Amino acid sequence: MLVLSSLTAATTLSVWLDCGLMPWTMTFPHEIHKLESKLNSRLLDDFTGERTGFVQVGQQKWFLPSKYEHQAVGYHNMTLRSDDIWVVTFPRSGTTWTQELLWLLNNDFDYDTARRVNLVERFPFLEELGVCGDGGRTPLRPGDKLHLPENNIFTSITCAQCRRTFSTLLDKEVKGEVIAKNPDNPDCATILDSWETPGYRFSSNMISPRHFKTHLPFSLLPPRLLDTCKVVYVARNPKDVAVSYYHHNRLLTVQGYQRDFATYWNYFEHNLLIGCPYWTHLTEAWDKRNHPNMMFLFYEELSKDIKSSINKISQFLGKQLTIKQMEDLATHLHIDNFRNNPAVSPIFGLRGLVRQGEQAFIRTGKVGGNSDYFTPELNVQANRWIEQNLQHTDLRFPC
């Protein structure tokens, strides 16, 4: 049964229409509540890229931007294909690294396409899905039209330089500010309009095999995901996640975090960052780790022995590879090469999308490189929180 307790009947109807589905074909088992007003206001002060606010979803109180309430049904009821490959992670857990590894294994080590076509097109972020539709095999030029199935609200959309959507993240006020900063780009408004279309709408037009990245937890994804598709889940130790996510939230203007790391960590602990609660995100996946279509990896293992991880994943996908292929892929994925590879960083082709002076999208990739961020007091607090949560699961990080 669809339950959206914070929505009016009219808004619920718009959710049905946005999914391109008839009401009786959908299910969504979670209630969605707007965040308490005072707390919402405080978060809006600290995250200047979000102008409307946040919602909490289900009994776990998954923390998401308010736009999610209009898209929840679409993501939960997205049509799956048996040859889809998914990467599911909490943000900043080695997602991009894993995407590139999987795409190359599943596309016969096609390094030419991997260098020519940005990863956001080859292996799109479901919540920010690119509109190219075929994983970059037929790149579109600015002004080209992508025709969508007739049962979608829009029959076509203009493709432009940055072919992806911040459908869950892009606020209308921020959109206006970006347009104002690009007066010399006549395509700016069209580009941003295309970003506002939810990823599940474009997925039906993509050529198989499709590859998806998502930060949504399993309980908000299609219920038959694991019974239908191959899924790789990557977990990373919470201190490293928080440091990386902190810099990511400072870099992107659609998030625009303003304050210090100690405040950020407290938001993390209290499940007030997008994608939280962190521990439930991980344990939902951990409990499914023995499903034949599931591979659960730790970022720390990828970092320590990438060749062993390549072999594990290739076996999971049913792929055979030579020693040379494995060594070439390991070299391609080495952090120094990866950081300098423009094809694996998002395309920020408009002024105003990133803040100057912040750390890059792909940072150091270090394990345990967080000591400078934690004062002795904050370190004690963080360790206590970690120990308390590990008492409820047999999940243990490699280091």
Image (tube, rainbow, N blue to C red):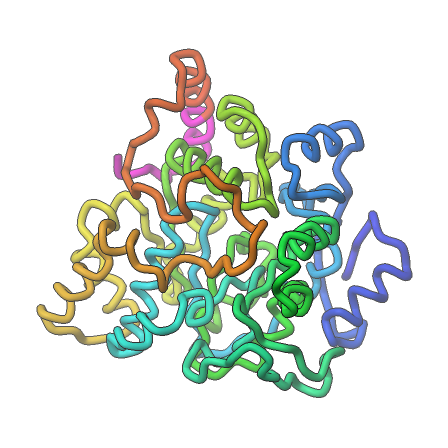
- Residue 376 is situated, as x and y percent measured from the top left of the image, at 38, 12
Determine which quarter of the picture holds residue 369: top left
- Residue 178 is situated, as x and y percent measured from the top left of the image, at 65, 53
The answer to which of 117 and 190 lies nearer the viewer is: 190
The answer to which of 272 and 222 lies nearer the viewer is: 272
Instruction: Confirm whether residue 373 shows in the render.
Output: yes
Q: From the viewer's perspective, is residue 35 above or below residue 129? A: above
Residue at 40% from the left image edge and 45% from the top image edge: 360
The answer to which of 178 and 284 lies nearer the viewer is: 178
- Residue 291 inside the magenta-drawn segment: no
Q: In this image, 97 relative to 307: left or right?
A: right
Number of callouts in the render? 0
Residue at 27% from the left image edge and 43% from the top image edge: 300
Q: From the viewer's perspective, is residue 51 above or below residue 399? A: below
Q: From the viewer's perspective, is residue 184 above or below residue 151? A: above
Q: In this image, 135 relative to 167: left or right?
A: left
Residue at 71% from the left image edge and 84% from the top image edge: 155
- Residue 389 inside the magenta-drawn segment: yes
Quadrant of the drawing holding the C terminus: top left
Please identify the residue farthest to the left as the structure is shown: 323
Q: From the viewer's perspective, is residue 292 above or below residue 297? A: below
Taken as a whole, is the magenta stretch helix, strand or loop?
loop
Please identify the residue farthest to the right as the structure is shown: 9
Determine which quarter of the picture holds residue 264: top right
Part of the protein shown in magenta: 386-399
Please identify the residue farthest to the top as the structure is shown: 377
Instruction: Confirm whether residue 77 shows in the render.
Output: no
- Residue 208 is situated, as x and y percent measured from the top left of the image, at 45, 82
Quadrant of the drawing holding the N terminus: bottom right
Residue at 21% from the left image edge and 61% from the top image edge: 332
